[in-house]
Amino acid sequence: MAERAPRVVAELGRPETPEETAARKAENSRKHRQRQTLRNLVLALVASLGLMLFIVLIVPRSNTAIERDVDVPAVAEQVQPAFSNDLAVPVLPEGWRANAAEIRTSKADQVTAWYVGYLTPGDEYIGMSQAVGANPSWVSTQLARTLPVGTTEIAGVDWTVYDNRTSDADVGNARYGLVAEAGEQTIILIGTASPEEFAELATALAPTITAHGSAGSE
């Protein structure tokens, strides 16, 4: 049988040398592997996106915002042994709820307070802090260093009023505040709620405040 003539390469105008043939085959093999790798990456990406879509479709969703609903009396009972005074646990009407209840200690002033974060029926915020042996620096810090604008009496308790609702200053949540002192304890209410909602919470706190010393008008 006659020996097959070497293939003439158009670009060269002559047959390939053995070295050129080996190089061409190696290059073709490299390009094939690259195409396979790219194809595998695309398939893996499509598979991942499909899995994510499947998870999104099967996981139940709700349009209702998730909010913590804290059992304030239960938390107060757990931490009460650490305090000499009765912790304030006001009884509030339906529509009020708490999203936090904890002990907070100020590193700067070393004042320990019982804190409860309330959400009002109008979906506004009021934070209540109850401390024994509080100092002016701690009170000022809680109220974003705002000056008082007057006083008011609510359910027999005198409160100092702090009002930042018309201020352009960055006071965070301290848009409005009330402070009452009875004996050694200080009660601070700060938040974004209306004065009427503040008064509702202050009324619920009155029995606890008056039980620890005179806080009302003579």
Image (cartoon, rainbow, N blue to C red):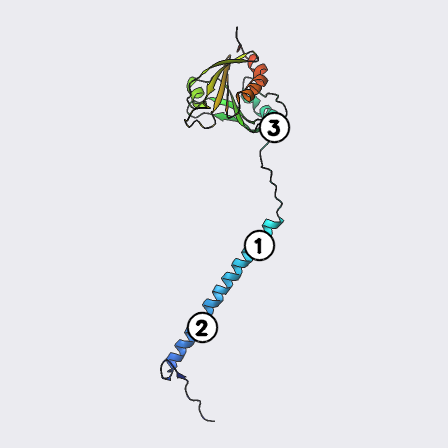
| Image spot of residue 27 (x, y percent) | 41, 73
Marks 1 and 2, the one that precedes in the sequence: 2
Marks 3 and 1, the one that precedes in the sequence: 1
> Label 1, label 2: how many angstroms apart (C-alpha)?
33 Å
Left or right of 36 in this view: 205: right
183 in relation to 68, above or below:
above
> Would you name the residue on which mark 1 appears?
51
| Image spot of residue 214 (x, y percent) | 53, 9
Mark 3 is on which residue type? Asp
Q: Residue furthest bottom?
A: 1
> Label 3, label 1: how many angstroms apart (C-alpha)?
39 Å
Helix, strand, or loop for circle 2?
Answer: helix
> Would you name the residue on which mark 2 appears?
29
| Image spot of residue 126 (x, y percent) | 53, 25
Helix, strand, or loop for circle 1?
Answer: helix
Residue 24 visible within the image: yes
133 in relation to 32, above or below:
above
Mark 1 is on which residue type? Leu
Marks 2 and 3, the one that precedes in the sequence: 2
Mark 2 is on which residue type? Ser
- Residue 166 vs residue 102, the one in the foreground: 166
Q: Residue furthest top?
A: 218
> Would you name the residue on which mark 3 appears?
71
Residue 185 visible within the image: no
- Residue 156 vs residue 116, the one in the foreground: 156
